[in-house]
């Protein structure tokens, strides 16, 4: 784990360095419009592109989004194949725009289970944006928090690490989000108040914000509301509020 993020000031407010989002509610949004679930997912991609832009504009350095969970394979096969196809559509529609805006993209998750075409698209996205520095977008796809912990342990074993060599910092270096500090703010849209196997390790001290907004409708106003809620939180990391260092106390 990297040390707790420093807050930096923008317009006087404390701004998170790293925001993580469970983009939930696409299916219900579509259902309300008497449309198939995939229609909601398509609009969800548009919402994501808007939110990436809004985060970059506000000076957020890292955005990590949950796009497809290890458990989402349980969905009807037409929805799963629709989502896989949407990856290809989204890349051809938006890669040039994101590239131009200075977005660096990492894909995190188990790639072994996805098709060769999707793997190639991920590779293309990562290569094309590797030199961008304005904001780092990590897209969690076929990702699960438990998968991440297990894959990191496997890598530790494969490296032949001795038990004494493995500590929290070393294991963190082997986790899928080792390129980013821990998320400061964890948002879930769609009204459910659960983690659903997202960043189990990294979200140990994230501030949680739940929004009833369905993901396709999430925009600047909802982002700003979450940022405002975050700015009002007191982060303690297990300590005592406003405590003077031990030596200074009587
Ligand atoms: C989240 O929206 C997107 C994915 C899981 C791919 P859902 O599809 O879960 O939408 P709801 O929760 O059914 O409304
Ligand atoms: C979490 O949403 C996964 C993504 C947003 C990609 P789900 O809709 O799959 O979560 P549950 O099933 O409500 O817990
Ligand atoms: Mg859902």
Image: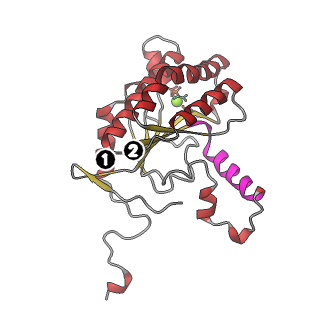
Q: Position of residue 46 (x, y in %)?
A: 43, 23
Q: Secondary structure at mark 2?
A: strand
Is 201 drawn above or below residue 109 in the view shown?
below
126 sits to left or right of 149? left
Q: Secondary structure at mark 1?
A: helix
Please name the residue that numbered disc 1 is placed on: 229
In this rendered view, identify the residue nearer to me: 101 or 153.
101
| Quadrant of the image containing the N terminus | bottom right
Which residue is outermost to the front?
131
Which residue is outermost to the bottom?
250
Q: Position of residue 141 (x, y in %)?
A: 59, 35
Tell me what residue is drawn at x 64 percent, y 54 percent: 174
Is 249 drawn above or below residue 86 in the view shown?
below
In magenta segment, residue 147:
yes
232 sits to left or right of 143? left
Residue 214 visible here: no
Q: Position of residue 163 (x, y in %)?
A: 73, 68
Tell me what residue is drawn at x 52 percent, y 20 percent: 92
- To which quarter of the image does residue 240 belong? bottom left
**Which span of residues is magenta-colored?**
140-157
- Colour theme: secondary structure
Q: Position of residue 159 (x, y in %)?
A: 75, 59
In this rendered view, identify the residue nearer to me: 150 or 111.
111
Which mark is on residue 209?
A: 2
Pointers 2 and 1 in contact (C-beta within 8 Å):
yes
């Amino acid at each position: 784990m990297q040390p707790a993020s420093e807050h930096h000031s923008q317009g006087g407010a404390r701004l998170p360095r790293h925001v993580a989002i469970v983009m939930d509610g696409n299916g219900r949004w579509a259902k309300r419009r008497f449309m198939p679930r995939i229609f909601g997912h398509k609009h969800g991609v548009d919402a994501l592109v808007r939110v990436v832009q809004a985060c970059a504009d506000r000076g957020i350095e890292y955005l990590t989004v949950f796009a497809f969970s290890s458990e989402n394979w349980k969905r009807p096969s037409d929805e799963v194949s629709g989502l896989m196809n949407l990856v290809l559509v989204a890349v051809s529609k938006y890669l040039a725009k994101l590239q131009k805006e200075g977005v660096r993209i990492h894909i995190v998750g188990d790639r072994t289970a996805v098709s060769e075409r999707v793997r190639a698209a991920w590779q293309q996205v990562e290569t094309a944006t590797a030199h961008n520095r304005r904001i780092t977008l990590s897209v969690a796809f076929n990702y699960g928090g438990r998968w991440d912990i297990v894959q990191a342990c496997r890598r530790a074993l494969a490296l032949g690490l001795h038990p004494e060599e493995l500590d929290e910092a070393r294991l963190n270096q082997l986790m899928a989000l080792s390129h980013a500090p821990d998320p400061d703010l964890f948002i879930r849209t769609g009204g459910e108040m659960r983690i659903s196997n997202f960043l189990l390790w990294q979200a140990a001290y994230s501030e949680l914000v739940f929004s009833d907004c369905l993901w396709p409708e999430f925009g600047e106003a909802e982002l700003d509301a979450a940022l405002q809620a975050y700015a009002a939180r007191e982060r303690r990391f297990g300590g005592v509020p406003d405590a003077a260092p031990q030596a200074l106390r009587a």
